[in-house]
Image (cartoon, grey):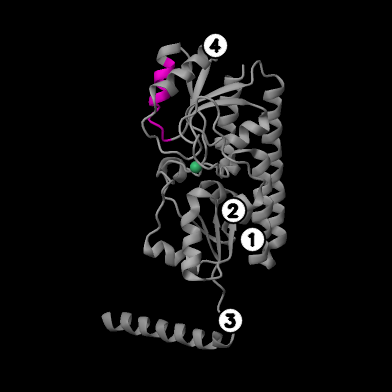
Amino acid sequence: MKIAKRLFALLLCALALLSSVACGGEAKPKDKPVVIATIFPQYDFIRQIAGDRVELHMLAKPGTEIHGFDPSLSEMTEILSCDLFVYVGGETDRWVDDLLKKNGRDLNAVALVDLCDTVDEECVPGMQGTAEEEPEADEHVWTSPGNAIRIVEGLTDALCALLPDEADAMRANAAAYRKELTALDADFRAVMQDAKRTTVVFAERFPFRYLCDELGLTYYAALPGCSSNEEVALSTVSFLIDRVNEEHLPGVFYIEFSDQRIANTIAKATGCETWLLHSCHNVSREDFDAGVTYLDLMRQNLIGIKKAVN
Ligand SMILES: [Zn+2]
């Protein structure tokens, strides 16, 4: 019995060998191109456009803080050998410039900031931190639906160049996705049309410049764009408390993965509510595994903005 099994196995091996020899003249089926996205927004955009036509990886681990990211040696090797690398660009991604410079490699890379018009980070009254520092371009371009549409267009071009045979199908996916983003954009504008107020308070750092600009929102925030949640001065918190009281604001925003410390302090002092506004930098492991999308998160943000302006 054992011998029969071995013979059978041997036969299978021989068959496999024969068929591989027979196919030797033809090209092996090509592996899918490897695309690496540094963080969640572009990871999701690429997923919507390309589906499973590419082997897509997100560099940031779900649930982790992406600012101050430092790639490991193996991650650097992966990036340098991938077929398309999509990063944000700007201050947080300085390590990418260093990586490319050091290796002198011609990497097929797209930066989101190159697909949109950027504005400088702004230090509004009451905000802690950047007054004396050189203003930097705000890199959180994906936070407005209008920019998301521009980014998807640019990524579609890059993906079609990578897989020309699949271009028609991917352009069709992108067109359908664009419709959803356009609808999201229209819904945000409709909320603003009926808004009772246009001032919002972020008890937090502030990566929403592009969203606020697009919606015509006046904002106050504790800290600029990508700051770490350092010790926030009492004067910063009391400035925000005054804004909530004077403008009778119904609530303040905090962002994902926040300890909500500042938001809770303001809520306690004023009796206002606290709401999450998701900046989409990264998502929790649970959300990632459940397949949450940029559109899901932005639809939740739409509800948050609606509460804030009414
Ligand atoms: Zn950031």
- Residue 42 or residue 200, whichever sits in front: 200
Label 2: which residue?
46
Label 1: which residue?
159
Label 3: which residue?
27
- Measured along the vertical axis of the image, is residue 310 above or below residue 226? above
Q: Is residue 259 magenta?
A: yes
Ranked by sequence position, the earlier of labels 4 and 2 is 2
> Disc 2 and disc 3: Cα gap in Å?
27 Å
Q: Is residue 168 magenta?
A: no
Label 4: which residue?
246
Residue occupying image coordinates x 72% and y 60% = 168
State the image coordinates of residue 58 (x, y, percent, origin top left): 48, 54
Circle 3 crowding by C-alpha within 10 Å: few under 14, some 14–19, many from 20 = few
Ranked by sequence position, the earlier of labels 2 and 1 is 2
- Residue type, label 3: Ala
Whether the residue carrying mark 2 lies under 8 Å from ligand 1 is answered with no
- Helix, strand or loop under label 4: helix
For the C terminus, the image quarter is top right
> Disc 3 and disc 1: Cα gap in Å?
22 Å
- Residue type, label 2: Ile
- Helix, strand or loop under label 1: helix
State the image coordinates of residue 182 (x, y, percent, origin top left): 71, 39
